[in-house]
Image (cartoon, rainbow, N blue to C red):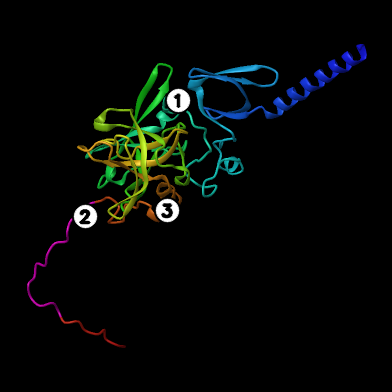
Amino acid sequence: MRLATGHLRIGVLLAACLVACTSLRAAEIKTVVLRNGPHIRAEIIKQDDRVVILDLGYDLLRVPRSQIEAITDDILPAQGVAEAAATPGWTPADANALYRTAPLAKTTIEQNVARFGEAVVMVSTPGGRGSGFLINPDGHLITNYHVIARETLIKATVFHETDHGYEQKRYDKIRIVAFNPYVDLALLKIEDANRTFAHVYLGDMGRVNVGEAVFAIGNPLGLTRSVSQGIVSTTNRDFEGRLYVQTTTDINPGNSGGPLFNLAGEVIGVTSMGYLYYGGLNFAIPVDVVRGFVDHWDAFAYRPDNPNAGFRYLQPGGRTKRGSPPTAGLPDSD
């Protein structure tokens, strides 16, 4: 009987060890990307709106939620293009892409606003104001073409996060990199900032579903950093020969050029237009169009010597002599 009991105890211990080992192998390892760039791969023991606790194997690490940019199953790209190109989970068209993509996990609107709200900017010109969003740490940003149409004096206000909230910083030196009026998109660059910027990740329309929750961040009527939410009504609404994402998310004047996010924090569209007197009818440019525009930005590069590049030219003066023009003659041959 003692022998049987001993065998039973050994069996229980082996079973417990097997369960423990199986649980250890099944532990869900995540990559936590910090706002200043580094990423940590570890098991998440606990997380809430304020803190994420990581198991480093030999110690527990408590990371404030405000310092986390993203949590994903794969390693997100680092700042360097060469390193990012070899990183799983980063899938731009090529290693020289100006934007970033990553398989982000879905979370709440509140957490996404905290993670990516700093990447949404206000774009100002003498003709008005709109919104935009930063697509990389170097200061490249996307907005609507109609926000900057016929303007060359452009300013961008970035809402940098501090320990006491958000601090407005206006950048006056904005370069027009490229624009395409036919898809209503413009690519700008903040020059001489001497800092890196928080940025967004671009999504994929192939993973956008009708009915899923989305939200927008922008500056409607100059009300900075306004957040509105809704759902995707349809992903391919034909409007005047172009396809749009139709959404119930409120889009008002000043929202133009801002991002439309899904619950993973990925940009799935650029908020473009809405009906002021009909609720729930709003439209965004699909993110696949944005990615195509940025991938081929050099085909739409802004050049000051191009008559269609934003400058206004005076019409040439009329003829001053009303007589018949001189008769053309052949040059004398030697």
Is the C terminus in the top left, top right, bottom left or bottom right quadrant? bottom left
Local SS, label 2: loop
Q: Report if residue 152 is visible in the image.
A: no
- The label shown at residue 111 is 1
From this view, report whether residue 220 is shown above or below residue 151.
above
* Amino acid type at image mark 2: Tyr
Between marks 1 and 3, how big is the CA–CA gap?
Answer: 35 Å
- Residue under the point 63% across and 29% down: 29
In the image as oriented, which residue stretches furthest toward the bottom? 334
Q: Nearer the viewer, residue 23 or 299?
A: 23
Local SS, label 3: helix
In the image as oriented, which residue stretches furthest toward the left? 322
Q: Identify the residue position indicated by label 2 in the image.
A: 313
- The label shown at residue 298 is 3
Between marks 2 and 3, how big is the CA–CA gap?
Answer: 24 Å
Earlier-in-chain disc, 2 versus 3: 3
The magenta-colored residue range is 312-326
Q: Nearer the viewer, residue 5 or 241?
A: 5
Contact between marks 1 and 3 (CB within 8 A): the answer is: no
Which is closer to the viewer, label 2 or label 1?
A: 1
